[in-house]
């Protein structure tokens, strides 16, 4: 008991010394991403979308939100792909960046699976992202309900680091602040698409995609998008 008390006291003293003699924080003003999403990404063309009223009301006023709906143009209605992309960049208030699972739950989605996937970029670098499999019920025109499945893929970007883990993001914020004197201004990009397999074509206007095909489409979109707005990848592309 005495040893544990001494250890705790020593840790407290070390923390106080670090706070006292650490230099002033730097960074935090410049994000690790550009505040824009490209209009063209591979086979996709993106149309700008405004943030929703819910996003505006829930996030701090200095949060930057960039959104585009990416479609494959020039194809027949039932053979198109559609994916939603967004980029959220924190302001001074850290509440701008959080686990997306929280917002998805508030929108009626239920999480069925969460896993880390690797995106091999054209440069050979590997970007780790988190893939959330989600589902919710939708009401059809005939009054019946059916499950709507989707995949939501995101990752966090700091000044010069990326991670698919919110816990690791928090640990990096703390350790880099103390050890590297870096205050990350975090951002999180995301892409989302429905799993259209089994859905009425007139409802989706898209080609029929299985879970695996939907994930492949989204990872290919990330492969094209990320180097166009993520600064540490832009320098290598």
Image (tube, rainbow, N blue to C red):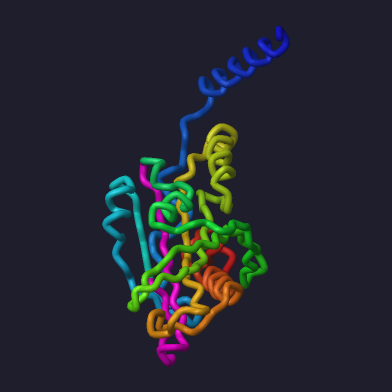
Residue depicted at x 32% and y 45%: 60
Left or right position of 54 against 155: left
Residue depicted at x 57% and y 77%: 210
Nearer to me, 24 or 183: 183
The N terminus - image quarter: top right
Rendered position, 7 above or below 237: above
Nearer to me, 109 or 221: 109
The answer to whether residue 88 is magenta is: yes
Which residues fall within the magenta stretch? 69-92
Query: How far across and how far down the image is residue 98, in percent?
Result: 45, 47
Residue depicted at x 58% and y 77%: 213
Dividing the picture into quadrants, the one containing residue 133 is bottom right
Query: How far across and how far down the image is residue 201, in percent?
Result: 43, 84
- Numbered-mark total: 0
Residue sitting farthest toward the top: 2
Left or right position of 158 against 47: right
Query: How far across and how far down the image is residue 92, in percent?
Result: 36, 41
Left or right position of 145 against 52: right
The C terminus - image quarter: bottom right
Dividing the picture into quadrants, the one containing residue 36 is bottom left
The answer to whether residue 130 is magenta is: no
Nearer to me, 217 or 43: 217
Nearer to me, 174 or 17: 174
């Amino acid at each position: 008991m005495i040893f544990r008390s001494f250890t705790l006291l020593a840790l407290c003293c070390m923390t106080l010394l670090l706070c006292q003699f650490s230099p002033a924080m730097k960074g935090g003003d410049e994000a690790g991403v550009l505040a824009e999403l490209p209009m063209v990404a591979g086979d996709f063309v993106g149309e700008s979308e405004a943030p929703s009223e819910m996003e505006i009301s829930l996030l701090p006023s200095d949060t930057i939100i960039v959104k585009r709906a990416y479609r494959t143009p020039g194809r027949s209605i039932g053979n198109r792909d559609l994916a939603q992309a967004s980029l959220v960049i924190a302001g001074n208030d850290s509440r701008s960046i959080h686990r997306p699972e929280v917002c998805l739950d508030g929108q009626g989605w239920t999480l069925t699976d969460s896993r880390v996937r690797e995106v091999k970029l054209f440069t050979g670098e590997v970007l780790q992202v988190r893939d959330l499999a989600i589902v919710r019920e939708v009401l059809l025109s005939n009054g019946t309900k059916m499950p709507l499945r989707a995949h939501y893929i995101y990752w966090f970007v700091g000044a010069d680091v990326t991670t698919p883990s919110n816990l690791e993001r928090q640990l990096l914020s703390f350790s880099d602040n103390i050890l590297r004197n870096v205050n990350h201004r975090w951002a999180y990009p995301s892409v989302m698409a429905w799993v259209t397999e089994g859905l009425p074509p007139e409802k989706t206007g898209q080609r029929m995609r299985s879970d695996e095909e939907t994930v492949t489409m989204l990872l290919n979109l990330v492969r094209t998008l990320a180097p166009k707005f993520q600064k540490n990848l832009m320098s290598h592309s």
